[in-house]
Image (cartoon, coloured by chain):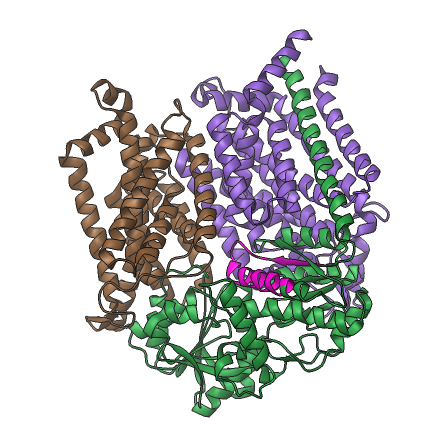
Chain colours: A green, B purple, C brown
Amino acid sequence: MKSFMKNVLAMLACSGLALTMLAGCSAPDETKKEEVKQAIKVGAILAETGGASFLGGPEARSMRMMVEQINAAGGVNGQPIELIIKDSAASPDKAISFAKQLIEEEQVLAILGPSTSGESMQLKSICEQAETILISCGAAEVIVNPVAKWVFKTPQTDSFAAMHIFAEMNKMGIDKIAVLSGNTGFGKAGRGQLQKIAPDFKITILEDEVYDKKSTDLSAVVAKINANKDVQAVINWSIVPAQAIVAKNMRQAGMTIPLFQSHGFGNVKYIEAAGEAAEGIIFPSGRLLAADILADDNVQKATLVKYIADYESKYAPEQASTFGGHGFDAIMILAKAIENAGSSDKAKVRDAIENLQGFPGTGGVFNFSATDHNGLAMDAFVMMTVKDGKFVLYHQ
Amino acid sequence: MAFKKHLPIAGLALALIGVQLITVATGSTYYLTQLTMVSYLGLLIIGLCLVMGYAGQISLGHAGFFGIGGYTSAALTTLNLSQAFSAGDPMVLALEKLGFLIHSQNIYGETLLYVHPWAACVAAIVATTLIAFGIGIPVLKLKGHYLAMATLGFGIIIYRIVLAVEIFGEADGISDVPPFPLIGNMAITGDLDQRVANYYIGAVVLLIGMILLQNLIHSRVGRALTAIHGAEDAADAMGVNTSRYKLYTFVVSAVFASLAGVFLTHYTGGISPSDAGVMKSVRFVAIVAIGGMASLWGALSIGLILNFMSLRGFFGSYDDAVFGTILIVIMLFAPDGILRLPFLQKLMHRQGDES
Amino acid sequence: MTLELFTQYLFAGITYGIIYAIVAIGFNIIYNTTGIINFAQGEFVMLGGMIAISLNGLVPLPVAITIAVILTMLIGGLIEIIFIRWLRSPSVLRLIIITIGLSILIREIALHIWGDTVRALPYFTGNVISSLNILGAHISPQVLWVIGVCSVMVVLLSLFFHFTSLGKEMQACASNRIAATLCGINAKNMVTFSFMLSAAIGALAGCVVSPITSSQYDMGTGLAIKGFTVAVLGGLGNSMAAVVAGILLGILEAFSIAIGFPLAFQDAISISILLVILFIRPNGLFGSAVSAGLKDF
């Protein structure tokens, strides 16, 4: 009898809690909506914590900084931007739940992010159906190819990075290579493009290994590649910490063949992590890392120099990275499109993004079109290398 | 007694309806999206509670079973067969008639031909049952930390497989999973116009799960399980086939987790490796522990509340930190679960005395 | 396979194995005195590395490491005093869940202190690209540091447990807590000591491996899982066995790469092997049924 009453009570307690929670969380929302009637609501779903925090962290910080600047300058078309950042911790079920929240409850104009390709793919059809703009910070090509009407992305396309690397290899006379990649969405997408494009450049992939993103040491993998004397160069497509570990293990094993990294090698911190082993690494990169050596008439120069200076003074000692730049590009493209459209109407802003031409961002000069929702061309990349602990342009 | 046994279930049903009505009254029906997701996760939680609280076996691998269900269903229903078969292929037509295959269009207007979600769901259950038996027979012979390690290891293996196999989408997981059609126009889908219906589908699935487990616990099997948990050797000596009961419970629980995976995947339209990851398993075990191990109601209510808050993004970047703190606090001050907190106990006893 | 290549794989395997083993030893110490698995062990490794990195530059490297080890040791002791010491006869499962909660909490605090950046300590001798030539294979001097520190640690631990009174008291608590208490040993203090010792060992491990593996706020979980695997493989509570099991597992992993086994499935395979071993020998490779029977849930 007692246990029966306990059950009833437990059940009541549970539903009671649920109800108070519902009541509790709906109340403050209402008041908040009243206060900022004029603001343009923009949502962002970024992995500030969890496995992809190296992406989501700088992206979120860049977006917060830019929204502050925009609002301090009087907003866009006189309207301030209200940025609502949700931390997905790189978990797609959260990303999906947040996307629905932002679209329906906050009625946002656009969603910026998510940080990873996997999450972006999950949100692609949700945003498409809800007719809400999605400007992804995920790198994979599948996000915008095939093109979905409402989905855009800011990071440079993997295939362009792969083509730059292969073109460089052709110049160096390299045709037999080894490919290493991490088991992340970034690594997966890059490896796929390398395998697809290699035949076009008459390059053969002799060794192809996928390692765990949390690998602590890769000397056995490096030994295997070293044992294959036909390999003339190594491409490593991954993120920290593995990209530093590969470089270290290769140099420790006495390997002298060139090491190419992906455009994920975009932060001065990585040179520090890899120390002297980073010397001579060749990699494609947006112009962010080369900002101070760009010619003064370069269209991107002003944007880059200002972004880097602002970011590094606001978030010191952290340094600006390519990833933060993806977040910067996403919010700035949106702001520019709202300005061009002259309204915050979803469809008009979407059209304005598609018509955006010659917009200098950190990732390159964006030229969107109905068939290209990334807007960056091959020349968004330059080949860079590490010399005396600094990033310098390769072949110059 | 039968009536009284089902009274809490009826209460839960009323509460679920009440919540829906409140959301309508306050114009906040959008909460139903997260509430639906939470009720599918609730299915997994009560299944895990059966294994942990009633059979006394820890399982740090339940996200693995969730993954087997979700991934089997997602992979089969997103594998586009229209390239492999010509349009008028008689075999395809026959299979379609029998309900094994289904046609539809994606957002780009391409034709898709894939395994019917019902067939995929059956495949997921069969796969889960076989794997649960296969892994359960040797694993359940282990005890203590070794059992914990073995189930944890099983979870890691599943995680590694979905992360490494191409048809499971590797690190990106699987997206664009089609709706799961039910009777008439109803389907398990995240579409907004079906949200209320889907909330009730989730609620009914959870209620059925709860009724099944309640009946199981109050049956001969349940009494045998209680005996096993209390004193396994004694139960053995009394002629209870302990290992067989433990195995059956484990399989039932695995199927619950797998179904949760199937339904949630169709509801959200996607699944990814982190859904099958170790941290998810740990989270589930923690929720059961916070709720009180041998209390289906406790585990269910905590599961609903914590998962709901997490999916709503209540704590922002502090989600895991808050979860860890709750875990520690409950284990320090109310090790038998939050529902056995002294003041709640007092309340219950007083009620009990009056009746 | 040439001798050079064989040696190269062998050393790679030993490097992996020692890193796992060094974490497993931390598990074993707490397990021995309390019968619980401290799932926050990986976080001690992370804390050691991160604190040392923050201090390095301010003070010389050896001082930074010493302070990091001492600080982590104090954190370990504090954790025990705040979260475990005052519980009256807690069940093992309850303790496990508390340590899981602590592990999550420490990781999140570390994220908010140090951020998500990957850092590393400098190489103890030479630099990042220096290597020694042993039987034709190239070995980073840091690998020798890791192997050396681990060996010294195992020897010192075994001396400590067999020849010092504190060590013997801790062992007495492990084998029979009530009897030990009756003999006048303060069992509660012994548990605190075991947490401090285990935290110190974890922190030291975190410092020595940091140049090789790099340190990041979330490195603990992965290491803890591998360490737990190795501890169970060897038989819980047996540190020497953990080292052997760790090296076996490490070498197995290295040579599975050598024979061209897909790296993506490596963990799945090594854990499958662990499961098979558990099914055949439920108490680990070197564990006895009696000792495993003593510590149940």
Q: Percent from the top left, x then y, of residue B77?
A: 70, 57
How many numbered marks does the figure carry? 0
Residue at the far top: name it.
B354
Relative side of B147 to A151, left or right: left
Q: Percent from the top left, x then y, of residue B153?
A: 45, 46
Q: Say which residue appears at 37% left-offset and 83% top-offset.
A: A230
Q: Percent from the top left, x then y, of residue B27?
A: 82, 42
Q: Say which residue appears at 33% left-offset and 81% top-offset.
A: A256
The quarter of the picture where the C terminus of chain B appears is top right
Residue at the far right: name it.
B184
Residue A55 against residue B50 in the figure, above or below? below
Relative side of A114 to B144, left or right: right
The quarter of the picture where the N terminus of chain B appears is top right
The answer to which quarter of the image holds residue A151 is: bottom right
User: Does residue B248 appear anywhere in the picture?
Assistant: no
Q: Say which residue appears at 63% left-offset and 16% top-offset.
A: B348
Q: Nearer the viewer, residue A193 or C294?
A: A193
Relative side of B35 to A66, left or right: right
The answer to which quarter of the image holds residue A286 is: bottom right
- Reply yes or no: does residue A47 show up in magenta: yes
Q: Percent from the top left, x then y, of residue A380?
A: 58, 81
- Reply yes or no: does residue C52 show up in magenta: no
User: Does residue C1 appear anywhere in the picture?
Assistant: yes
Residue B260 against residue A373 in the figure, above or below? above
Q: Say which residue appears at 49% left-offset and 41% top-offset.
A: B60
Magenta part of the protein: which range?
A: A42-68
Residue at the far front: name it.
A73
Q: Nearer the viewer, residue B92 or A378?
A: A378
Residue A372 against residue C44 in the figure, above or below? below
